[in-house]
């Protein structure tokens, strides 16, 4: 609200000015730069979540009115955009002030109203986070980061909405960008990544085909085998045998 705060969030130094918003996720470290809180005035709210594991949706609890798909997208934005400070968030100041008023006045329906305001808070944070990240990077850079994230966790069943959220775009704009950048629709591009990683794993003789299929995000070894042959012309077993003969 006023003053200047020097904070360290997850070992990174940040300076917060009036109107800025700090976001500290579950498990992240937080402290003042000088080992004490700076002089000034702030609003803060602590939201207890049920689940916050990486690559899993942040489960908010039954109080939230957000749909499952909305919660999932917001989770991805908060976890993967890694934006600790959002600048000039006047909308959030208004929301926090309204929450404070509801808590103090406790008029009829105040609990429901507070729940709605917290949902609105999360929506505004997600929107501003993606917007701020878009201003700081162009699509090729964001795309490289996206692909690296996908390759690290291919067993997760990624959706277009999740991938779009990671680069701060709507699904339509994201799909068009990916098509122009790679020549593939997002899910087809994801399949190509899965197959490219599977090829690397097939060269590791100690891994069986079923384990490779599950690790690269296929539903079953049969699904993996069918897709692999469609894209490479060989079944996984045929590819492995051919590769070993060539080596």
Image (cartoon, rainbow, N blue to C red):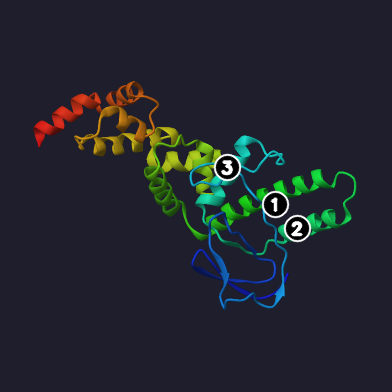
Distance from label 1 to label 2 (Cα)?
8 Å
Residue visible at 25% across and 39% down in the picture: 200
Q: Circle 2 — which element?
A: helix
Residues at discs 1 and 2 in contact (Cβ within 8 Å): yes
User: Which numbered dot is residue 121?
Assistant: 1
Residue under numbered circle 2: 96
User: Which numbered dot is residue 48?
Assistant: none
Residue visible at 86% across and 44% down in the picture: 109
Of marks 2 and 3, the one in the foreground: 2
Residue visible at 72% across and 49% down in the picture: 118
| Quadrant of image for the C terminus | top left
Q: Nearer the viewer, residue 233 or 59?
A: 59
Residues at discs 2 and 3 in contact (Cβ within 8 Å): no
Q: Is residue 101 above or below residue 70?
A: below
User: Which numbered dot is residue 73?
Assistant: 3
32 relative position to 201: left or right: right
Q: How crowded is mark 2: few (under 14 residues within 10 Å), some or many (20 or more)?
A: some
| Residue 85 horizontal/vertical position (percent) | 59, 63
Asked which quadrant contains residue 161, the reply is top right
Residues at discs 3 and 1 in contact (Cβ within 8 Å): no
Q: Nearer the viewer, residue 222 or 169?
A: 222
Distance from label 2 to label 3 (Cα)?
22 Å
103 relative position to 77: left or right: right
Asked which quadrant contains residue 62, the reply is top right
98 relative position to 83: left or right: right
Q: Circle 3 — which element?
A: helix
First along the sequence among labels 3 and 1: 3
First along the sequence among labels 2 and 3: 3
């Amino acid at each position: 609200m006023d003053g200047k705060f020097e904070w360290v969030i997850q070992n990174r130094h940040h300076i917060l000015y009036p109107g800025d918003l700090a976001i500290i996720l579950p498990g992240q470290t937080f402290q003042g730069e000088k080992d004490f809180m700076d002089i000034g005035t702030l609003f803060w709210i602590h939201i207890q979540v049920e689940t916050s594991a990486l690559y899993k949706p942040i489960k908010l609890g039954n109080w939230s009115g957000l749909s499952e798909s909305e919660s999932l997208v917001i989770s991805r934005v908060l976890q993967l955009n890694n934006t600790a400070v959002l600048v000039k968030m006047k909308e959030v100041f208004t929301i926090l002030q309204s929450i404070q008023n509801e808590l103090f006045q406790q008029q009829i329906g105040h609990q429901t109203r507070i729940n709605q305001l917290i949902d609105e808070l999360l929506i505004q944070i997600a929107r501003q986070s993606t917007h701020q990240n878009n201003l700081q990077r162009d699509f090729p850079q964001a795309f490289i980061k996206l692909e690296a994230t996908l390759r690290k966790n291919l067993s997760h069943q990624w959706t277009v909405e999740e991938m779009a959220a990671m680069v701060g775009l709507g699904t339509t704009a994201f799909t068009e960008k990916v098509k122009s950048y790679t020549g593939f629709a997002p899910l087809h591009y994801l399949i190509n990544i899965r197959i490219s990683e599977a090829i690397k794993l097939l060269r590791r003789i100690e891994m069986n085909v079923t384990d490779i299929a599950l690790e690269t995000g296929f539903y079953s070894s049969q699904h993996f085998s069918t897709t692999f042959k469609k894209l490479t012309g060989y079944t996984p077993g045929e590819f492995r045998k051919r590769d070993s003969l060539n080596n």
